[in-house]
Structures are given as C-alpha cells and as structure tokens.
Amino acid sequence: EMMKELSGLYVLESKLKEMLNLSEVIVVPGDSDQDVWVKNDMGKAAADRLKRQLSAKNIIAVTGGTTLASVAEMMTPIQKGQQLLFVPARGGLGEKVENQANTICSTMAQKANGEYRLLHLPDQLSKETYLSLMAEPGVKEVMELIHSAGIVLHGIGDAKTMAVRRNSDPSLLQKLEKEKAVAEAFGYYFDQQGEVVHRVRTIGLQLDELQNSDFIMAVAGGSSKSDAIAAFMKHGPKKVLITDEGAARQLLGRS
Ligand code: G3H
C-alpha cells in the first residue's frame, strides 16, 4: 500500500473513478500489454476485492477471456460457512476452452471451495435452437441462477481483437468496422458512445439485466483497451473497475 501511495496510483484511481463515473477503481502497477505478469496482478486484485464483497450466500456470474482466467487462477479458498455458487454469465461465444466462461467458472469454484453450474451450449445458436434450448428444464434452472446472481464479474475486450479471436464471420467483421465498434463485453459489441452495435445470440445474462445485480466488477487492463473500457463504462449502473496503470494513464491522457 505504501508503494502504491508513492507511485501515485491512488491519484489515478480517484481521477478514473470520477472520469468514468464508477463506484470504485483499483489500479495495479504496470501495463499488461507490455508485461504478462501484470494480468496476474489484476487477477489477484480482483480476487481479493471479490472476497471482501462476499457474504454468507452468494451467486457469482462470470464471463470468459484471458483476464478472467487470471482472476480464477488467483482465487483462494473462502472462509468456512460461506456458500458460493459460480455460474457462467452467458453461453458459448466462440472462445477456446481455456477462455470460456464455463471453464473459468469451474476453476474459480474449485479454487474458492465453492460450487458451480454450467451452461452446455453450442456456439452461435440459430433462433430456433436458442428458443428450444431456453425451454429445456436443465437450462431453465441454470438461467434462474444466473438471473439471481448478486455479483457479476466480467472482462472487457477490444472489439476487433475479440471478433477475430472468436473466428467470427467476415460479415460480422465488416459490420463491426462499419459501425465503428470499439468494445466487447458479455458477447455484446459497443461503439465509442457505448451503444450496442451487435449482440451474439446466446443464452444467459442480457445486458439490460445487469442492473439487477448489486455488485458488477469489470477486470480489464493494458493501454490498448483504453477505448474499450471508456466505451463500455458509458453503460450504467455504477460499477467497480480493476485495471492496470497502462490503461489508466492512457484513459486519463485522452481527457
Ligand atoms: O470476453 C472476453 C473479454 O471481453 C476480454 O477478453 O480478457 O482475454 O482480453 P480478454
């Protein structure tokens, strides 16, 4: 903490909190675009912050991505008597197994000594498949848990990086370019104003349902994500952001 004060990170945190209209910001030193260990430090900060938030019974919805995978890696056992249930926020988004919400959800639960439920769904559902899966009792049960999650933990990605990483159709890449998408979160793509320009059709938490959760924490860093973070944060309600110095300095430099 002493180091943090001396390095001016507290100043970055309070400036960023004001600029992005957030309820809390934690900035870890370094830039995860430059140094890979910085992502683990964000993961550790997020896991610690999550643990301070927990009460006796919590349902925690988590998204995918490499940053959330770091949060899962850094998770440590919770106190005895606490009951935690981890669920994936949304179904398949076209990610590799290690970056999928299901994988991250089960790792987090194992490390925390909690429980988990998964959504076993194919990626990129057709409308018919989507509607019939929604009617399945097993899916319905997990959906109810997702909707009652008091805590949501998610990553934010650069729109193009995410679309390419998910092997999206050339038509989607064109659409994102045309609509000037800069951010991605929960399988939604956003433009600079924070408006949704595309949504991946999959089961789970929809963006407008976020407001039902008490605690929404984004974990995203690296100077290359500054536009994405700024765009996504234009969406209410007030959120918590765990980021790194690289993203923080880039964000504040733009204002
Ligand atoms: O869902 C993925 C996130 O939006 C960003 O992924 O943490 O690997 O950059 P990342």
Image (tube, rainbow, N blue to C red):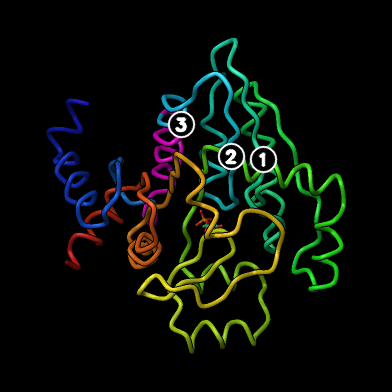
Q: Secondary structure at mark 2?
A: loop
For marks 2 and 3, give the one nearer the viewer: 2
Residue at mark 1: 87
Q: Is residue 40 magenta?
A: yes
Magenta region: 33-48
Residue at mark 3: 50
The residue that appears at 39% across and 43% down in the rendered structure is 38
The crowding category of the residue bearing disc 2, from other C-alpha atoms within 10 Å (few below 14, some 14 to 19, many at least 20), is many
In depth, the one of 40 and 143 nearer the eye is 143
Q: Which mark is residue 149?
A: 2
The secondary structure that most of the magenta stretch takes on is helix
Asked whether the residues under the numbered discs 1 and 2 touch, taking CB atoms below 8 Å apart as contact, a structural biologist would say yes
Image height check: is 172 above or below 209?
below
Q: CA distance from mark 2 to mark 3?
A: 14 Å
Residue reaching furthest top?
80
Q: Position of residue 252 (x, y in %)?
A: 19, 59
Q: Earlier in the sequence, mark 3 or mark 1?
A: 3
Q: Is residue 165 magenta?
A: no
Is the residue indicated by label 3 positioned so its CB lies within 8 Å of ligand 1?
A: no
